[in-house]
Image: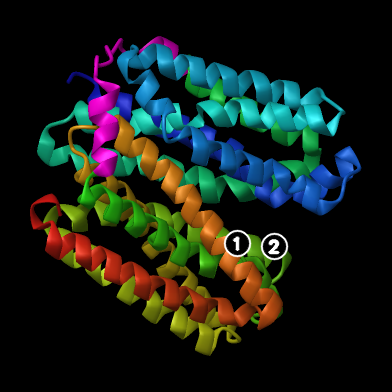
């Protein structure tokens, strides 16, 4: 397709805006609590309710919108994100601000799910994974690089400007979509036939594999700031820099993951839980030493990017004839995995101490290795 690279880069920027809106608030929960005069756990609803809404809506929203023109769907979603982030910047009631978070979250899976589908559709089959990985780079950048940017804006200019920062990014993506994005007709599909793939053995085992893959990664990662503070003595600006480096490494990991999945699919998938487990054991042993820990964080970032690629590939390859449904499930199950990992990590931190989240992550990854192996050897043609 003509201008396929431009289309992919617009979607990449759009996913960056959408994911920045979702995850950027992670770094500004104290400012949210102060601005609305609520406690920090209430402020956390800005994150948890958003993620829960995605987990529910990701199951069906991309599928429902699969029959509509892609450009119109993208314009709708980016318009909603821009509008409600702007409203959210000026409301003073916490409950209304929460509603301004939940409404965009309903539409979030439409943009991300369809962007992943479109990226694979508009290029030659052998380039599909590369194209998809570029969109996932936008996801990673929003999730990780979006956090320090939002924190910087809120720290220097206040909570309202951090919301307007979200509006600005999605507004720029909206304008680029209106001007440069071509009309791409949707596909009339039988919802029953797409949903029917959810009952197949390969799809069910793939769903479990993706949940535990993300669960293992987030068991280790969800309390990483606390780990670096209490064990490695990395604080403040130094912490922001380390997490930013992690984020950049994850974007490189997205690119590397696409190459590895294209050339050595099964080796890449099955070696991931093993290599990740070796990394977190190293962190458990050497977590008190600053220089080794920074090196570990770079490798961790690379693996996080590769892990996102594996999750998306694992779902779509389990349902090649239902890509919108599979990409929606990828987003939903990713969020279920994040919830699982965060819950496990919270229990471990409360009961044993923050360093033991790394051992818990190994246990989750062993379960995931079993699930990935079952899929690979029982359904070799789908791997």
Q: Which residue is mark 1?
A: 241
Determine the residue positioned at 17% across, 20% down.
1
Q: Say if residue 157 shows up in the picture.
A: yes
Look at 49% across and 51% down and name the residue there.
336
Disc 1, SS: helix
Report whether 18 appears left or right of 363.
right
Badge 2: how crowded within 10 Å, few (<14), some, or many (20+)? few
Tell me the residue at 30%/12% (across/down): 182
Magenta stretch: includes residue 87: no
Residue 169, disc: none
Scheme of colours in the image? rainbow
The answer to whether the residue labelled 1 contacts the one labelled 2, judged by CB atoms less than 8 Å apart, is yes
Give the CA distance from mark 1 to mark 2: 6 Å
Picture coordinates of residue 99, whole percent (x, y): 71, 28
What span is colored magenta in the figure? Answer: 176-199
Label 2, on which residue? 237
Magenta residue check for 190? yes
Question: Which residue is depicted at the point 53% across and 67% down?
Answer: 219
Towards the viewer: 281 or 365:
365
Position of 24 with respect to 14 (left or right) is right
């Amino acid at each position: 397709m003509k201008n396929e690279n431009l289309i992919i880069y617009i979607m990449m920027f759009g996913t960056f805006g959408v994911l920045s809106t979702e995850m950027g608030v992670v770094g500004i929960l104290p400012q949210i609590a102060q601005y609305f005069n609520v406690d920090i756990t209430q402020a956390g609803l800005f994150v948890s309710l958003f993620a829960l809404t995605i987990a529910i809506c990701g199951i069906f929203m991309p599928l429902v919108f699969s029959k509509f023109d892609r450009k119109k769907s993208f314009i709708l979603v980016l318009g909603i994100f821009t509008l409600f982030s702007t409203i959210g910047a000026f409301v003073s009631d916490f409950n209304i601000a929460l509603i301004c978070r939940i409404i965009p979250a309903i539409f979030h899976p439409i943009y991300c799910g369809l962007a992943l589908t479109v990226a694979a559709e508009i290029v030659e089959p052998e380039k599909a994974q590369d194209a998809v990985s570029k969109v996932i780079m936008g996801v990673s950048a929003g999730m990780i690089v979006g956090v320090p940017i939002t924190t910087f804006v809120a720290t220097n200019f206040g909570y309202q400007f951090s919301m307007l920062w979200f509006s600005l990014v999605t507004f720029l993506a909206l304008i680029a979509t209106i001007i440069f994005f071509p009309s791409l007709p949707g596909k009339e599909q039988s919802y029953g036939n797409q949903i029917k793939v959810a009952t197949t053995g390969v799809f069910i085992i793939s769903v479990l594999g993706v949940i535990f893959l993300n669960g293992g990664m987030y068991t280790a990662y969800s309390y990483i700031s606390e780990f670096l503070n209490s064990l490695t003595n990395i604080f403040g600006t130094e912490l922001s820099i380390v997490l930013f480096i992690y984020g950049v490494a994850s974007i490189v990991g997205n690119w590397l993951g696409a190459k590895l999945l294209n050339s050595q699919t099964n080796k890449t998938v099955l070696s991931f839980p093993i290599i990740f487990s070796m990394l977190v054991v190293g962190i458990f042993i050497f977590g008190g030493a600053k220089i080794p820990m920074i090196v570990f964080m770079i490798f961790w970032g690379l693996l996080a990017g590769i892990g996102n690629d594996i999750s998306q590939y694992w779902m779509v390859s389990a349902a090649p004839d239902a890509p919108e449904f599979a990409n929606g499930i990828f987003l939903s199950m990713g969020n279920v995995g994040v919830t699982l990992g965060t819950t496990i990590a919270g229990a471990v931190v409360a009961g044993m101490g923050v360093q033991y989240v790394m051992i818990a992550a190994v246990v989750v990854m062993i379960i995931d290795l079993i699930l990935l192996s079952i899929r690979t050897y029982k359904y070799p043609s789908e791997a």
